[in-house]
Amino acid sequence: MFRIQTMNSIAAEGLYLFSADKYEVGPGTADPDAILLRSADLRKVSIPQSVLAIVRAGAGYNNIPVEECSERGIVVFNTPGANANAVKELTLAALFLSSRKISDSIRWLLSLKDGASAGGDVSALVEKEKSRFEGPEISGKTLGVVGLGSIGVMVANDAAALGMDVIGYDPYISVNAAWNLSRSVRHAETIEDVLRNSDYVSIHVPYSDATKDMLSADKIRIMKKGARLLNFARGGLAKEADVISALESGRLSVYITDFPTVELLKNDKVICIPHLGASTPEAEINCAICAVKQAKNFLENGVIENSVNFPSCRLSRNSPYRLLAANRNIPNMVGQITTLLAAGGINITDLINHHRDGYAYNIIDTEQEIPASILAALQNIPGIIRVRTIA
């Protein structure tokens, strides 16, 4: 029986996939094998020693202490792409909001309510004042998309279909993303190429130490005068003080973000949206289903897909017993593991080893069950972080 602790409300369509005969699921589950969450902040709590995996039903994972988890051999998963359509639709809406002064015009109209209630002629005033809210069409303009993951590719493709000239930049674009990208999207060699040639720039990259404040004064200075900036990825990607300064100088004409702060709310050239990117019932269901499937495949088969701290690793199951080992990526780890197994008379039928960012993961199928004494010896190999078996 696997134990799953839920730390947020997870869509029932996903939780339904945990069969009652194999899983105990709930917010009060003790000694969990896996934690399933959305926005709960794990950086402020003690993660139980029993935890093998943490699964984020969503793309962002800055609420999880990833480095600590890596050191403990806890595999952290997210669900990239599950909420991609929801974020894409809001980004497209932001393109129009940034151009046509729709928000300003609605606020102005609402200010006329008292006069309208008193029988004032709103229609005449509208015709007189509507020119104040004139804005350009997006068709024929250039959109720069920084980050071509699941969301960035969808934004680029749909913007191209709306008649925009789209430039995309992503030095780490995956094969799948490249296959899905419209041939009409032009490839930029550097982020500077995107910034200096775009009327609109939309950011779609993960937040990390490497991407924090990636759009600061030196980058914003390159942008076209009057460019419009959209950020539906993470607030910390654009350096707030520099964005505000660029708005005040006219370097940027509008900033639209899904990550409001007090300072941004004070600025009339900023349109803040209350983190609605993934707030659709479809996205919540998709994320829940994806998260549960990943948790099940890892717990039951040891397969890793969409991990943020360990390498993807998959091996078809053709033997009755499976050994799983997480280790630091240092020389002779596989050799030491296989030598111990051989010395114990354990025959290996299949093996795969992948590494990423200083860590490695092994799936080893065997014909015999591995006794506790060998598992203890494996765990004591310097560099081994965690071992477990599946039968």
Image: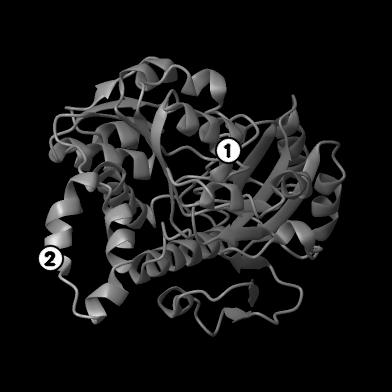
Q: Quadrant of residue 352?
A: top right
**Residue at image point 31% right, 24% down:** 198
Residue to which mark 2 is pinned: 123
Q: Amino acid at mark 1?
A: Glu
**Residue at image point 55% right, 28% down:** 214
Q: Amino acid at mark 2?
A: Ser
- Disc sitting over residue 240 in the figure: 1
326 versus 277 height, above or below: above
On screen, residue 140 versus residue 12, left or right, reads left
Q: Quadrant of residue 169?
A: top left
Q: Is residue 329 visible?
A: yes
On screen, residue 294 versus residue 372, left or right, reads left
- Disc sitting over residue 263 in the figure: none
User: Residue 39: where, in percent of width, then height?
Assistant: 59, 63
Q: Nearer the viewer, mark 1 or mark 2?
A: 2
Between 311 and 317, the residue placed more toward the observer is 311
Quadrant where the C terminus sits is: bottom right
How far apart are labels 1 and 2 at the CA level? 39 Å
User: Residue 121: where, in percent of width, then height?
Assistant: 15, 70
201 versus 285 height, above or below: above
